[in-house]
Amino acid sequence: MSEGLLAVERSLREAAPHAVVEAVRASLMEHYAVASVELLMADYGLSVLQPVLAVPYTAVPVGVHTGTAGRAFGAQEAVSESVGSGLTCVYLPVSVRGDRLGVLTVTFPDERCTPQVVEELTEVATVLGRELVVAERDTDVYLQARRTERLTLAAEMQWQLLPGRSCSRPEFDLGAQLEPAYAIYGDNFDWCTGANSLTLALTNGMGEGIDAALLTNLTVNALRNARRAGISLPDQAALADQAIYSQHKGRLHVETVLLNVDLDTGRGQVIDAGSPRLLRMRGKHIESIDFEQQLPLGMFDQTEYFTEEITLLPGDRLIFVSDGVHAVLAPDGEIYGRQALHRAINATRMLPAAEVPPAILREISEWSRTTIEDDALVMCLDWRGR
């Protein structure tokens, strides 16, 4: 590792949480003779890359799906382009274990743009991503930079619950997205990876606004509490069910799907307590995977839950969708429906898992000729196995 790279990493570790971007900028200018450095962060709607500047944010954002920065973000690899006057700009994806945060842009003289330097800057972008995740615990700077408009209070609560929007391990790739990103209230998702298993939880709480967000918050944390106690999937569901029923006495409930997959074998256990729906793409064939419907969490006192089996094969793609996706209406009253959803899944088959959920949600918005107003959740799991 070069002395310059070591110095940049040290400056990032030592930087104050709010000053991480300033630290990487100053260190790269000192050790790599760069002309400029800028961090672009993906907004909650995954539509733009927003420059991280001092408040208020007045710089023009960059489209996630357009331009060189968008190419680097989508491909998750460094992209270079000449910007004239003897300068080259390198766009470097900023990600943490597959969770795509944004793009770091670095401009420096053409003669400095060597493969070794680009490789070292790619490592800088990776270290920056990790430092941003840590820094967000102590400052609002980067969370503010991710929004193009104000979040509703319910949406603020929902986004703070999420583990991320994508995750990658050798065995799988995972991506998910919520819409309307700035006004979501009831839908949510959670995941946890261990040495030998992957656990997913997708929830759809009753109600609207802050009431739905509070209900989902209770549910997600009850499931996490039970999961972290190391108990079985049916007992996790039962304990969360009891927590919700104790609070609301059956007036409110939460539709939930729980999935636990063994990373060695691809065999999984599923609890289908109402929603979302699950579809599988195996090769070119798309099919709905139906399980026995069990009672939503919190509907009745002391409900017992049971698991059903599913087996994943290398190359399988699972798509989970909430009712805000498969039951969305066009202005003329037409329901989006199964066939349209199958077409959207097929159209996105070449995209990586992280890009599938926003692509499907964009397709639905275009089909309905309006913005998505009801809660909509899409999750994509690409399975490779061991």
Image (cartoon, rainbow, N blue to C red):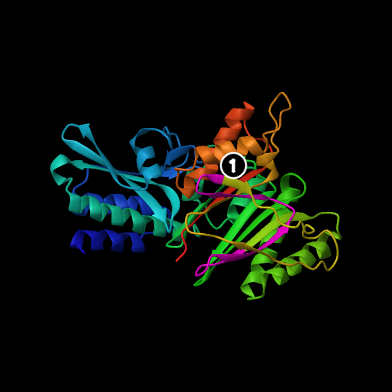
Position of residue 234 measured from the top left corner of the image (x, y, whole percent): 71, 69
Q: Position of residue 243 (x, y in %)?
A: 77, 66
Please state which of residues 76 and 225 is positioned toward the viewer in this rendering: 76
Magenta: main secondary structure equals: strand
Span colored in magenta: 260-285
The answer to if 283 sits in the magenta stretch is: yes
In the rendered image, is residue 45 in sight?
A: no
Please tell me in which quadrant of the rendered image residue 238 appears.
Answer: bottom right
Q: Residue furthest top?
A: 332
Residue 249 in view (yes/no):
yes
Position above or below: 176 against 66: below
Horizontal arrangement in the rendering, residue 7 relative to residue 129 (left or right):
left
* Quarter of the figure that contains the C terminus: bottom left
Between residues 5 and 135, which one lies in front from this camera angle?
A: 5
Q: Which residue is mark 1?
A: 181
Seen at 39% across and 55% down, the residue is 129
Q: Position of residue 215 (x, y in %)?
A: 74, 55
The kind of residue tagged 1 is Ala
Q: Is residue 52 above or below residue 264?
A: above
Number of numbered discs overlaid on the protein picture: 1
Q: Quadrant of the N terminus?
A: bottom left
Work out whether 307 lies above or below 142. below
Q: Left or right of 251: which side holds 49?
A: left
Give the x, y percent position of residue 9. Answer: 30, 61
